[in-house]
Amino acid sequence: MVPHNERQRHVVLVDPTDSLKEHIADELGVKGFTISAVESASECLGYIEHSDIDGVVSRYDLPDLDGLHLLRSIRISHPSLPFILHPQEGSEQIAGESIAAGVSGYVPNDSDPVTVVSRLQNSAQEAGSLPDDESYDRYRHLVEISPAPINLFDSEGTIIWGNNAVVELLGLESREELIGSSIFEFIHPDDHDRAHNELETVTGDKASTGPTSMELSLPDEEVRYIRVTTAVGSFLGTDIGQAVVTDTTEQKEREHQLQILDTWLRHNIRNSITIINGLASEIARQQTDDMEESARQIQDYTETLAKQADQERQLLNLVTSRPTPIIFDAHHLVTQAIKTSRKKFPSSEIRLTRANKIKIRAIPKILEALQELIANGIEHTEGESPTVEIQIVHHSDSYGEIRIVDNGPGIPTPAIEILHPDSEINQLHHGSGLGLVFASWVVRLSEGKISFQEANPRGSIVSLRFQTANE
């Protein structure tokens, strides 16, 4: 019986077959333990992350990662938590590796329930009497609170542990989604060979690497750019890599944006000025048959340059100021954009065809971005009846979407490709204007996503995806 004044201790049983619970549940109850039975290592890690746990008893064969990997992951953040490995089919190798990894007790499968629970009790008593390892605790605490993403992985690239900054960088909901995964699940396929070479250098040759530039592919299809520096380490009987990551996505995007502006200034403005100078020279030498038409052309080019200069100034302000997203009522925002666009294009049809009620997070320039996209759909439409339809779609509590659908010829592939930070920018691949670039950057700075597809039977669909929000 458990003394009245002694709290019940909580133990997690990790076993996909449930046989472990059947084997020792009664004895655990007699000794005063409450039980949480889980089927996988990730469920166990979730319990430990969010609950007060006094011990773990685990099988070796688990569906996501084996009991040894689970042990090593737990030891990073809970070095003295009692952990009993009770495999159904053990071996001397598993026993030796588990002891090296800091197991509290290795109990063969043929052991009776009393033996298993006694080892757990003894481990709990020993854990309570062990002095704290101050240097280890200090290191673990620094890793946990570090604003820099830090990731620990074994010689095969299996992730043992990562701090909160890594979880956030990879767009995961919790640490248990991370632990047991392979680093190659998050590295872009183009960088797999480079990552394999670095893994071999760190865990095989025992040498540090980096900083090395790589590209990440995240679960939500977002791409991020990083520099990673990896040091060799040893933890509980196994060689590990300790990777410190710097997120360079914002820097890469800013460099790309400035390169677009530089190329545009050198190419588009130079060409316009060359044409203007040619027309002016013809007028001065009275070599033009229609002086009024030449003057009108000069006027058109200067007006276009003035408009493009305003776009360039807006883009430069976006690049340098990095405004903070605020909350907008999507319906009010879209109706404003439609009202302004109808005044500018009175002969075009601009209509709202779907209007779910949502509030979105975006930077203040989002209204101008919507107007640019509407104008883009109208100005490039051949014929006398350009049409733009706008839809506001509520997908979930986390995000909503604004779609701009036109009946034009479609957006040229180079104009879309230039928006990607890895795209090559040169005089043959620069885009003719900055309206689409401006809209894309506004959406990106709003922490949203922009995508493009063809409409049926013709035209383009531009989709803007934003985080939804409450006031």
Image: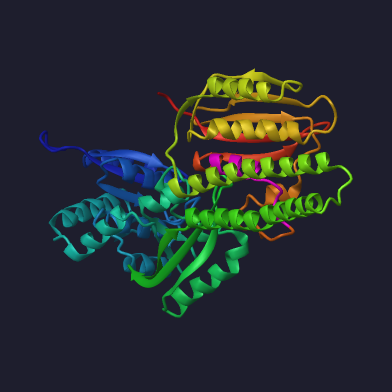
Q: Which quarter of the figure is the C terminus placed in?
A: top left
The x, y position of residue 236, in whole percent, is: 32, 67
| Residue 318 sits above or below residue 244 on the image | above
Please report the residue visible at 49 percent of the width from the left and 71 percent of the height from the top: 199
The x, y position of residue 452, in whole percent, is: 69, 40
Please report the residue visible at 42 percent of the width from the left and 78 percent of the height from the top: 207
User: What residue range appears in magenta?
Assistant: 429-442
Residue 104, quarter of picture: bottom left
Which residue, as the protein is rendered here, is positioned at the far left? 5
Residue 6, quarter of picture: top left
Please report the residue visible at 41 percent of the width from the left and 42 percent of the height from the top: 38
Q: Nearer the viewer, residue 466 or 415?
A: 415
| Residue 388 sits above or below residue 58 on the image | above
Q: Is residue 203 left or right of residue 100?
A: right
The x, y position of residue 52, in whole percent, is: 25, 42
Can residue 237 be seen?
no
**How many discs appear?**
0
